[in-house]
Image (tube, grey):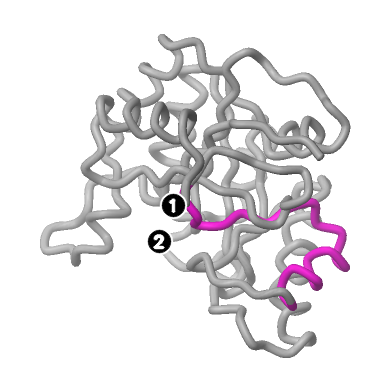
Amino acid sequence: MRTLRVPILMYHHISMPPKGAYAVRRDLSVPPEMFEEHLRYLRHEGYVTVTLHDLCLALQIGYPLPERPIIITIDDGYGDAYTNAFPLLRKYGFTATFFVITGYTDEERAEHLTWEQIIEMDAAGMEIEAHGHTHPDLRNRTVDYLVWQILGAKQAIEARTHKSVRFFAYPSGKYDEQVIRVLQSAHYWGGITLHAGAEHRSDRMFELTRIRVQGGNDVEDLAANIEWFMDHTAP
């Protein structure tokens, strides 16, 4: 059994919240200028972005990671992931993992990524992974329903990127043992939670932890959060 401490940052919107936005939207929104400050800080501190694939291989077979690895994840597949986050990631030489909701893309929802944008980001070295077909609470569901949400999302992405989808971010962080069993049967390698932490274990690949980045987090907040979770085991 291997244990590693690697910070996995969790973002959602990379944009200013609209005027009059509700509290949750404000909390999920990191302005592009602040996101750029975060990236500038990470590069200055010598962090190197790795993928979830890299982390999995490091935990399972001892695959070497750089001295200061970090994983950037962006959930929900909002359009600002392409218009705002993607150019800044390329500017600073970073990669990120984008968890997309495939049903929203199929429906061509205005606020979400298009398949063309997803394909472009994948071709540029970004990691495209699954966040369900319609982002429901997956607890206490039938196996058939879980297969539709989990395998369906996987196949939709793979049909466009021609790369294996191996990681699943639980919608709203909700999951149970049945969800994990279906993920395993669909040949996923890991599940990403909303549990706070930076310590990952090879025997808990379907309960990977993250560090949430909130809308009001400046560089000092980001640095303090990373430092705390790298030094402590979250409860």
Residue 186 falls in which quadrant of the image?
bottom right
Q: Residue at x 65, y 56 (%)?
A: 207
Q: Quadrant of the N terminus?
A: top right
On screen, 181 above or below 30? below
Which residue is at 41% across, 9% downward? 44
Q: Nearer the viewer, residue 213 or 105?
A: 213
Amino acid type of the residue tagged 1 in the rendering: Gly
Left or right: where 3 falls relative to 39: right
Residue 164 x/y as whole percent: 83, 49
Q: Is residue 201 magenta?
A: no
Residue corresponding to mark 2: 111
Q: Secondary structure at mark 2?
A: loop
Residue 188 picture quarter: bottom right
Look at the numbered discs 2 and 1 and tell me whether their residues touch, using CB distance below 8 Å: yes
Q: Residue at x 61, y 81 (%)?
A: 139
Identify the residue position indicated by label 1 in the image: 79
Q: How far is mark 2 from mark 1, CA to CA?
A: 5 Å
